[in-house]
Image (cartoon, rainbow, N blue to C red):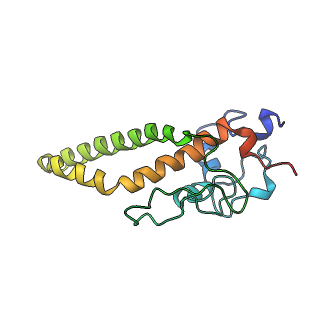
Amino acid sequence: MASTKEFCFCFPPLTCWQVPLVWFGTGIRKSVKMPDYRHPRPRLFSFWACKCPRCGRDKVFSNSIFSPTKFAKTREACTHCGLTYQPEPGFFFGAMYWSYAIIVATIVSMSIAFSVFGIFEHAIWAIPVVLILGLPLIFRYSRMLMLYVVYPVMYRDRFRKPSN
């Protein structure tokens, strides 16, 4: 089993200017030893493209976001590195908290924007419309936050490169 220093993204603690460098994949964290699973693009771009959190090559979702009934279909595992996207039953229940945070941030930011521009009377219908139309995005990116933030911390042994 690898020590915490070999894997943990937060050892030693990052300073404020180093955090964006880690997310954009510039290699400031040399202690992470996954040479076979280097991302072909920065991790933040892999996150937005809904790619595998370990290798960044395979898609996490099997269907298009524009499919009205199948936008939520998550693949079982990555075909490139073999990472299982659902390490245990109910893993994605934690995505509810992420989606709650995204929805609250959207409501607050839109309320402030409507208030600043002096059109707050339109907020009563505009905010629900934006949230309903954005539900597939909120659903997908709350799951992606679970995969990119929670998975490497809770399941270090599964997230690391498997020993062959």
Query: Camera-side residue: 143 or 126?
Result: 143
Residue 99 percent location from the top left of the image: 41, 43
Measuring 25% from the left and 48% from the top, which residue is drawn there?
A: 113
User: Which residue sits furthest left?
Assistant: 121
Q: How many marks?
A: 0
The image quarter containing residue 25 is bottom right
Query: Vertical placement of 48 versus 157: above or below?
Result: below
Residue 45 percent location from the top left of the image: 57, 59
- Decide if residue 66 is on the left or right side of residue 107: right
Quadrant for the N terminus, please.
top right
Query: Vertical placement of 45 versus 23: above or below?
Result: below
Measuring 69% from the left and 62% from the top, which residue is drawn there?
A: 79
Measuring 40% from the left and 39% from the top, which residue is drawn there?
A: 101
Measuring 66% from the left and 58% from the top, which residue is drawn there?
A: 78
Residue 139 percent location from the top left of the image: 43, 50
The image quarter containing residue 5 is top right
Query: Camera-side residue: 74 or 49?
Result: 74
The image quarter containing residue 154 is top right
Residue 69 percent location from the top left of the image: 39, 61
- Decide if residue 146 is on the left or right side of residue 21: left
